[in-house]
Every structure is written in C-alpha cells, then in structure tokens.
Amino acid sequence: MPKKLDGKKDQLMGSAKEKLGKATGNESTELKGKLQKAKGNIKERTGEAQDKVADKANDLDDRHNDK
C-alpha cells in the first residue's frame, strides 16, 4: 500500500509542477512535473503488482493449510 500512496502523491505533485511550468512558460519545471508524474505512475503500478502477488501467495497458503 505505501508504494501506491507514494505514487499517487508523486502524480499529484508532478501534475501541479507541470501546470505551474506551463502557466509560467518554464519548460524545465513543466518537464520535471511530467517526469514526476511518470515516476508516480510507475510506483503505483508496482504497488498494485505487489498487492496482487501477495494476494495470490496468501490464497495458495490458505489452500495449503486447509488440507
């Protein structure tokens, strides 16, 4: 869960930086915002994948313990 939340935070902060860069004509800030947003997307997806793997592992463990 922490990676997903951290990813969402990076997405929001990146979006804000991107908009600020566009509004002020600062291409560097705009690019930094886009990169932070992309980083957030990666973190969120990584967190989702970790959750899915953990769920599958728990399911397998539960099935094994039921026998």
Image (cartoon, rainbow, N blue to C red):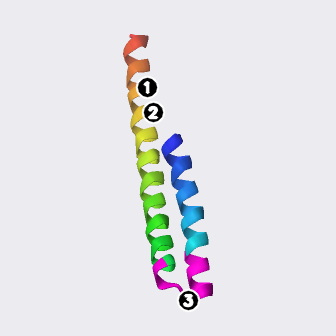
Q: Main secondary structure of the magenta part?
A: helix
Residue 20: numbered disc: none
Is 66 above or below relative to 57? above
The residue at which mark 3 appears reads as: 25
Pointer 2 with pointer 1, Cβ within 8 A: yes
Query: For residue 55, which numbered disc appears in the image?
Result: 2
Q: What percent of the width, then of the height, locates residue 27?
A: 48, 84
- Looking at the rendered structure, which numbered label has been put on residue 58? 1
Where residue 47 sits in the image (x, y, percent)?
45, 45
Residue 2 relative to residue 42: left or right: right
Structural crowding at the residue carrying mark 1, measured as other residues with C-alpha within 10 Å and reported as few (<14), some (14–19) or many (≥20): few
Q: Which residues are magenta?
A: 18-28
Give the residue type that dot 1 points to. Asn
Element type at mark 2: helix
Please give the name of the residue rendered at 53% of the width and 49% of the height, measured from the top-left corner: 6
Q: Quadrant of the C terminus?
A: top left
